[in-house]
Amino acid sequence: MSKRRVVVTGLGIVSPLGCGVEHVWAQLLAGKSGLARVTHFETEDLPCQIAGVIPRVDGRNGGGPDVPGSFDPDAVMPARDAKRIDDFILYGIAAADEAIAHSGWQPADDAARERAGVLIGSGIGGLQTMYDASITLHERGPRKLSPFVIPAMLINLASGQVSIRHGLKGPNHSVVTACSTGAHAIGDAARLIAYGDADVMVAGGAESAITRLGFGGFCAARAMSTGFNDRPEAASRPYDTDRDGFVMGEGAGVVVLEEYEAAKARGATIYAEVVGYGLSGDAYHITAPAEDGDGGFRSMSAALKSAGLSPSDIDYVNAHGTSTPKGDEIELKAVERLLGDHAGKVVMSSTKSATGHLLGAAGAIEAIFSILAIRDGICPPTLNLDNPSVESPINLAPHKAVKKDIKVALSNSFGFGGTNASVVLKAAG
Amino acid sequence: MSDVFDRVKKIVIEHLDVEEDKVTEKASFIDDLGADSLDNVELVMAFEEEFDIEIPDDAAEHIQTVGDAVKFISEKVG
């Protein structure tokens, strides 16, 4: 069957750099860091005490009622309703609201609603809700569990809530692939449109794992940065010699995807086309990336193949680049292997240096950053890259954004379990 | 009775975010106050907490209105 073209017409972000696509993008290009000490729960006994917390109007992470880009939960829904959903769903709803409003798309009738779906995933889901419910169960018994415990923490309830809120009656789906979730969600949603299951998809990822349980668990797996508790903004340093683990972030990234002809017909602003999507598995280890980087190489190759493009077409790569000692170099080598002689002409950066690692939301906000890089002809920087641990012909955009005409961008996401996803985005037209 | 009614009313207003004058004895949680089946479960839990009583599931099923709740609770705490 002939596949239909899929374009991006709306963007929405809730992140450690704040809320709102243009605000976050400006912060990112200016080299601002969203990382700070965690103050909303006890960290004294944890090896990692820093994170990319969303700035809130209540003062959390430097936010405030008069600070631009601060997240205001009350502006999304009444506190009574927000108490019945986990934060990851709240972030997903806020990002979806922005993306849908931004797209200007409105369903004309019920038939249009039935052709519009939602595919928002999460790597972990309602961790704090599960933790709190476990305490209640243990201390007070099952009769004291709220009827909202399960719908508050279920991962697909981000998609469910967004569909109810906006009346979207098309495919309602979700993705759970750890740190590849956001990329898989956008890729899968694009395929639903390409293959005719829907005309519009609201797609992305949401995460809220900055909790004691999340920190305890990832610290036990020895995955998190522990040496920069006194210098949070310097902690996420992909490719740098001194990197010592990832820094957790939270938030959501959501895009509106539309079938190209329909988007064009309604005069929508088209930000980019989703031209390629590739997936692969490492089949190697539950948390460690395969040393040869073959999984990442194969997902990138598959994405290019589905786009009908070759490695020499790539201008910008938004790396997975989490600032872990092993992963960064493995990915870098895989990208070098893919690009070959073209490597010297490509810019690759890790925006996790500024946002931290948003786990299941990472692939979604990074696809959005790739789209904006295409729009504005500029590659966001890799912060804290003082001394690269290996030499590379690829420009890793240390410290400062790099101006560059970008036609094609590739965004990588790799997750626990050895799950890899790559999305290829192309300038509109 | 009136003390129980006032305390039930306060809980209903808090949980269902409704106007005070709508919470009459005859008001049905679902039909008049916008509750769904999950809200009802949560309300019953809140009554149990407030009055330090246990409301068995089969009894809870018959608590459809504010008056039903007040009557059941009044008999329990009597």
Image (tube, coloured by chain):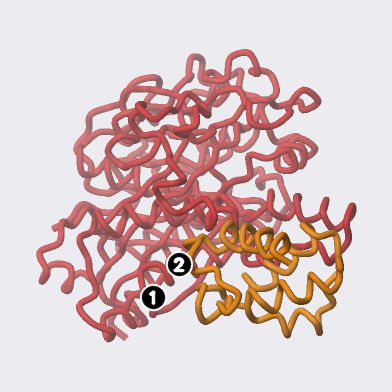
Chain colours: A red, B orange
The residue carrying pointer 2 sits among few (fewer than 14), some (14 to 19) or many (20 or more) residues within 10 Å by Cα, namely many
- B33 to the left or right of A64: right
Q: Which residue is mark 2?
A: A119
Q: Are marks 2 and 1 in contact (CB under 8 Å)?
A: yes
Q: Which residue is mark 1?
A: A192
Say which residue appears at 42% left-offset and 71% top-offset: A163
Q: Chain of mark 2?
A: A
Label 1 element class: helix
- At which x and y percent is residue A20? 33, 41
- Which comes sooner in the sequence, label 2 or label 1? 2
Say which residue appears at 35% left-offset and 35% top-offset: A24
- At which x and y percent is residue A12? 34, 50
Mark 2 or mark 1, whichever is nearer to me: 2
- A428 to the left or right of A341: left
The three-letter amino acid code for the residue at tag 2 is Leu
The three-letter amino acid code for the residue at tag 1 is Leu
